[in-house]
Every structure is written in structure tokens, then in C-alpha cells.
Amino acid sequence: MSSQTLPPPPEKGGILLGCGAAVVDYLAAVAAYPKPDDKIRTTSLQVQGGGNAGNALTCAARLGLKPRLISKASSLL
């Protein structure tokens, strides 16, 4: 695909709309990669927002766009 067929990038400060799941990522660090069936302890744990749309919109915000997310709120209970 040539660059002549692509639409122009959004202007700086433009709004970018994403549709997807709003999820939570649990990031656990370990000292070494575990062997099969090993039980090891984590050295740190971080809880962050995630999901494909959320991660892409975070990148867009860092590039100067104004991201918006459409998602469904639900409960597992």
C-alpha cells in the first residue's frame, strides 16, 4: 500500500475513539523464569489498566491526541 492511499494522520489534539473492553492487568515480576510445575514468589506486583483498546489509547494520548473509550461495564458477581 502506498502512502498516497492512506488518510492523513489526525491533527495534534484531535480526538481518537476506541471501542473495547476495559480490563485490569496484573503484572508480576519474578527473579527467574520458572521451570515447569515450579512454584515461585513474585518480587513485585503492579495493577494497571489494560486491554487492546486501552493500551492503544494510552499510546495515542502520549502522542498528543485526545483518546476516548467506549466500553461496557459489567460485574463478574
Image (cartoon, grey):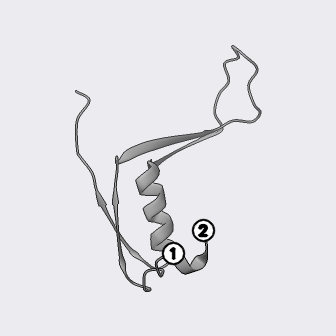
Location of residue 62 with respect to 32 vertically, above or below: below
Q: Is residue 3 left or right of residue 38?
A: left
Q: What residue does disc 1 label?
A: 6
Q: Is tag 2's residue or tag 1's residue first in the polypeptide sequence?
A: 2
Could you tell me which quadrant the N terminus lies in?
Answer: bottom right
How many C-alpha atoms fall within 10 Å of the one at disc 1: few (<14), some, or many (≥20)?
few
The x, y position of residue 39, in whole percent, is 66, 18
- Furthest residue in direction top, as rendered: 37
Q: Is residue 22 left or right of residue 73?
A: right
Location of residue 17 with respect to 47 vertically, above or below: below
On residue 69, the disc is none
The x, y position of residue 70, in whole percent, is 27, 57
Q: What residue does disc 2 label?
A: 1
Amino acid on which the number 2 mark rests in the picture: Met
Counting every numbered tag in the picture gives: 2
Amino acid on which the number 1 mark rests in the picture: Leu
Task: Kindly indicate the quadrant of the structure image that contains residue 75.
Answer: top left
| Residue at image location 63% in from the left, 33% down from the top | 42
SS state under label 2: loop
| Residue at image location 44% in from the left, 85% down from the top | 12
Q: Nearer the viewer, residue 38 or 67?
A: 67
- Contact between marks 2 and 1 (CB within 8 A): the answer is yes
| Residue at image location 31% in from the left, 60% down from the top | 69
SS state under label 1: loop
Alpha carbons under labels 2 and 1: distance apart: 8 Å
| Residue at image location 52% in from the left, 76% down from the top | 5
How many C-alpha atoms fall within 10 Å of the one at disc 2: few (<14), some, or many (≥20)?
few
The x, y position of residue 7, in whole percent, is 46, 77
Location of residue 49 with respect to 59 vertically, above or below: above
Could you tell me which quadrant the C terminus lies in?
Answer: top left
